[in-house]
Amino acid sequence: MTERDEAATAAETLAEVIALRPGADGAGDTAALPDGLAERVTGALEFVRRRLSGDYTIDDFGFDPDFNETVVLPLLRPLFDSWFRVDVRGVENLPVDGPALLVANHAGTVPVDGLMLSVAVRDHHPRARVTRMLAADLVFDTPVLGTVSRKAGHTLACHADAEALLGDGALVTVFPEGFKGVGKPFSERYKLQRFGRGGFVAAALRTGTPIVPVSIVGSEEIYPKIADIAPLARLLGLPYFPVTPTFPLLGPLGAVPLPSKWQIEFGTPIPTAGRPASEADDPMVLFEVTDQVRDRIQQSLYRMLAARRSVFFG
């Protein structure tokens, strides 16, 4: 038996002991431990066993479903459920199976909105589907963050990856505003920036994939950006270096997001099936569909903001 096999066997045995499974006399009793503790410890040890024994899969893009379910999502759920208290609407507009391209507004100085959107899809879709985010090169060039992002299912925001994922029937999410949206000043909150050159529309047209507009309210208030230290941003190789009412004045405490009340709404899909694939190379068609998607999201944001009673209490 190899050293890895021995470690995996030991982890599995310890998981059984911690879980207090019934022995020969059927006397096992999980009541001796606090509620849920035995289950969490057993789950953690099972995860260790799977990692040591190689009992998990990773796809061609680096997505590790076991890591995402066991490590990433449990870390994000307290933010989703208790800190931002996210309300999710329109999940019925997501396909039960098959591909869809989710197009969302992007904001908040730090792109927490993408993380919350991933939880919204996973926890509110009737089949608990996963959405694959298209992210900027900077994410994957950052140590640790790049590795975790790959394992969580995210990949580069490029045509080839988008079309490959859609062709495989995945839910794919894109934020066409990019850093222009996430780094805009607080004075321009909820005003959509330009949506690039329509690359996401081309991917949808080539694969006949429906486009689902997604509107996110609440993300703009977590880090109100009031200034940008451009020289420091250039020195650090960042698109901007934000100044907020709490950062960098309060140091690490300033990195704690404000607990705004969030809403995520999935809009009515825009179909592309049946349209000629050649339209993906027509700049006028790309502009027209891109503008349609952008207008849908902007109007939805205005409607949601008009109905919002408070930034922090919904």
Image (cartoon, helix red, strand yellow):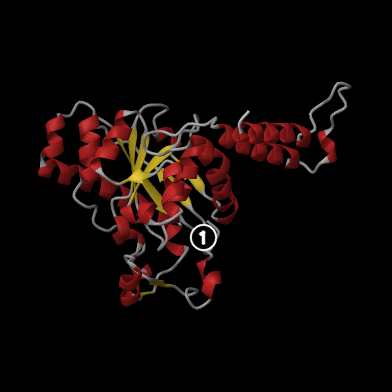
Q: Is residue 254 left or right of residue 1?
A: left
User: What residue is shown at x 26% (from left), y 49% (from top)?
Assistant: 294
Q: Residue furthest top?
A: 24
Any part of residue 274 in sight: yes
Q: Is residue 32 left or right of residue 96?
A: right
Q: Quadrant of residue 302?
A: bottom left
User: What residue is shown at x 12% (from left), y 32% (from top)?
Assistant: 278
Q: Quadrant of residue 103?
A: top left
Could you tell me the amino acid type at mark 1? Ser
Q: Is residue 217 above or below residue 172?
A: below
Residue 135 spot, x, y in % from top left? 34, 49
Residue 260 spot, x, y in % from top left? 51, 60
Crowding around mark 1 (Cα neighbors within 10 Å: few <14, some 14 to 19, many 20+) is: many
Disc 1 target residue: 260
User: What residue is shown at x 28% (from left), y 50% (from top)?
Assistant: 176
User: What residue is shown at x 16% (from left), y 30% (from top)?
Assistant: 277
Residue 181 spot, x, y in % from top left? 32, 59
